[in-house]
Amino acid sequence: MNNIIKRYIPQILAILFVVLIFGFLTMNAQTNMDNRGIDFGFGFLSQESSFDVQFSLIEYSGSDSYARAFLVGLLNTLLVSFISIIFCTILGVIIGVARLSSNYLIKNTAAWYVEFFRNIPLLLQIFFWYYAALRALPMPEKANAWFGVTYMTVKGYYIPAMVWENLNVFLYCGLAAIIAIIVIRIYAIRLRDTQGKQIPVLLYSAALLIVLPLLSFLFGGVSLEFEIPELKKLSKISYIYEGGISLPPELIALVLALSLYTSTFVAECVRAGIEGVTKGQKEAAASVGLTPNQVLKLVIMPQALRIIIPPTTNQYLNLTKNSSLAAAIAYPDLVLVFAGTALMQTGKAIEIVSITMLTYLTISLTIAAIMNWYNKKIEIKEK
Amino acid sequence: MFKIIKQLTSVVAMFAVLFAFSTETMAAKKSKTLENTKKRGFVRCGVSQGLPGFSNADESGNWTGIDVDVCRAVAAATLGDATKVKFTPLSAKERFTALTSGEIDILSRNTTWTLSRDADIGLTFVGVNFYDGQGFMVRKGSGISSTGEFKNGTSVCTNLGTTTELNMRDFFDSRGISYEPVVFEKADEVVAAYDAGRCDTYTTDKSGLAAQRTKLSAPDDHVVLPETISKEPLGPVVRQGDSVWEDIVRWSLNTMIEAEEYGVNSSNADMMKTSNNPAIKRLVGAEGELGAAFGLDNDWNLRIIKQVGNYGESYKRNIADTGILPDRGPNELWTKGGILYVPPAR
């Protein structure tokens, strides 16, 4: 009994304390808002937003609601975070491995890269890439074609748009390929466990992934055409490209800054992970007759990943939250569109800031959950 | 034991802070902005982060501009000294929150008076100190001479959180032109991006365009188009719910405008006490008890005119002489063909 009291009383008190503080703050805010004639409510979300957004993944215009403007901002935040996470991972792994290279030049270049990019404030890097790019990039009419059909200009990177016919058939073929790959993998594992035979799963998978969608072009009536951007005159001296897709320079600068900055931290995580696996493991694996590739795949990486994943998760979370610096260079992310323009036009500061905070919290928790699931999957399984 | 005491003290301190905050906010309910200002000894005024002619700080931190002069006038009226103002530079996004949360008592930051701002968000506009309208700036070489020549795909640089964003949409939508809005949080960033060729045009209030043009690398290569696409009456704002304070700010501004109308300025104000015109005598505190209604003494308006000057002096000093907008346009007195017209001070 005494033990139970000792255990629970402090916890109950702590919870009570937190509830009291929140209650008090809410009440205080409520009184202050009443005094100043500000209403609290989320009704504004269904009102017409009446402002336009530069870049949106979904159909959006000023006659849509604030709720849709929120969605536009959210998707833009997710887009920039997603692309940057992929780039920073690829770059981070390469740099991290390079730091362990025995080649003096590669090793030191990687070390300099890490020290340089992680020690300059991110906001400065964003400004640098944005304004440096704006100064350095050509006007649309002077741009040279990259790969014949894409144009990098001060107004954005113009790429051809894909015009599909029977896109769903193509997607079904892709899905079928993925299912087939999963089946082959399961079969390969069973084959290995029962008969000790190894089959080249990677090769089969790649073949399936290429051949099946290719078949859909030949027999499924799928066709793909490209809409190539064309130069159009706006005035005597100003041009744009029409047709195709335009990636705004704000997005490119932001992705560049976020991935370069975060890749340095990922590189350090990777280096720590690989160095964390003792040399004896490698030697032992070699002595039982595994090939160098198998040593890396079956012995080193599974152990290294366990060390790499948790700190890398932190970096992904940081990157996502850092993407809110987008507002500084006019990339229409959640903060600029919703906590910026929408907040200004409605004056609903408390509501909008709470929604924005909750949204970031949800994104971060989701990323953390995915990474934790992956971490669980690869951690040591006691048998 | 010591640890427990330490913890307890921090808890008590935390509550003390929270309650202190709460009592301060309760005071505002009783319309005591004036009393608090007197107690504090300075007027808390929200201004822009640097818009020449309206509110701009020099290297030594001295603020000048016609928006700044409104706050100085209020300080002269309430505290007797036009220099007793604490200026808080605010972005367009922060300005209303700063006012409604009680961080500042006057927002004098080239803010457009609109119905929703006035009615919705706990603010009250007290008057207009500059009649403006939204315009477009383009490169001279583009050959564009009117807004009718914009084509589909025009990219437009502007500021976040302003009526500009809404007007711009109304303008392009009503003409069926598709455009690319590039929206920055700070004016300096808009200027830099426009200067670098990111946008074909830069839109904001025309006075703003005239002022920002001076910051471009080659100001003469740019031109402001003649059309005005919106009404932008700019004026000072106060919090809702303190009608006395609201009146003080309104009539401080009105005094400056009326003083110009009657030819009273900073150098002749004292002499005007013996004028034959009762309207002028009221304006310099020599007749009537105009200050009593606000809880001020009778020389409040005389101090405004002597220390800050009349509206014409303020305009000349800040906007005309700095070359921003030498022509007063609609911001001329109604007696001289403009639309500046204030209710009589009597």
Image (cartoon, coloured by chain):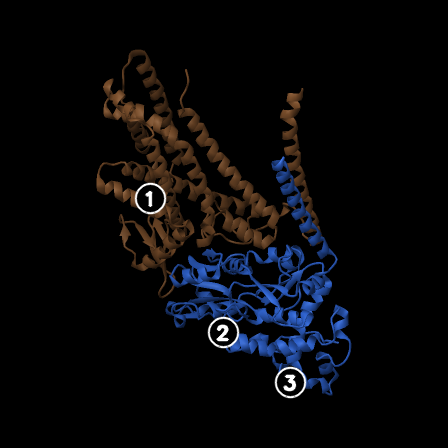
Chain colours: A brown, B blue
Q: Viewer-proximal residue, B103 or B151?
A: B103
Say which of marks 1 and 2 sits in front.
1
Which numbered circle lies on residue B324?
Answer: 2
Instruction: Report the Cα–Cα distance between label 1 and label 2.
Output: 48 Å
Image x and y of residue B276, in percent = 74, 88
Q: Quadrant of residue A12?
A: top right
The answer to whether B289 appears left or right of B323 in the picture is right
Q: Viewer-proximal residue, A254 or A274?
A: A274
Instruction: Report the Cα–Cα distance between label 3 and label 2.
Output: 27 Å
What is the chain letter for disc 3?
A: B
Q: Quadrant of the N terminus of chain A?
A: top right
The answer to whether marks 1 and 2 sit on the same chain is no
Q: Crowdedness of circle 1 by 10 Å Cα count: few (<14), some, many (20+)? A: many
| Residue located 27% across and 22% down the image | A200
| Residue located 46% across and 69% down the image | B225
Q: Earlier in the sequence, mark 3 or mark 2?
A: 3
Question: Identity of the amino acid at label 3?
Answer: Asn
Which numbered circle lies on residue A114?
Answer: 1
Q: Crowdedness of circle 2 by 10 Å Cα count: few (<14), some, many (20+)? A: some
Tag 2 secondary structure: loop
Question: Identity of the amino acid at label 1?
Answer: Val
Image x and y of residue B265, in percent = 63, 81
Which numbered circle lies on residue A180?
Answer: none
Provide the residue designation for mark 3: B268
The answer to whether B206 appears left or right of B244 in the picture is left
Tag 1 secondary structure: helix
Residue A224 is at least partly visible in this image: yes
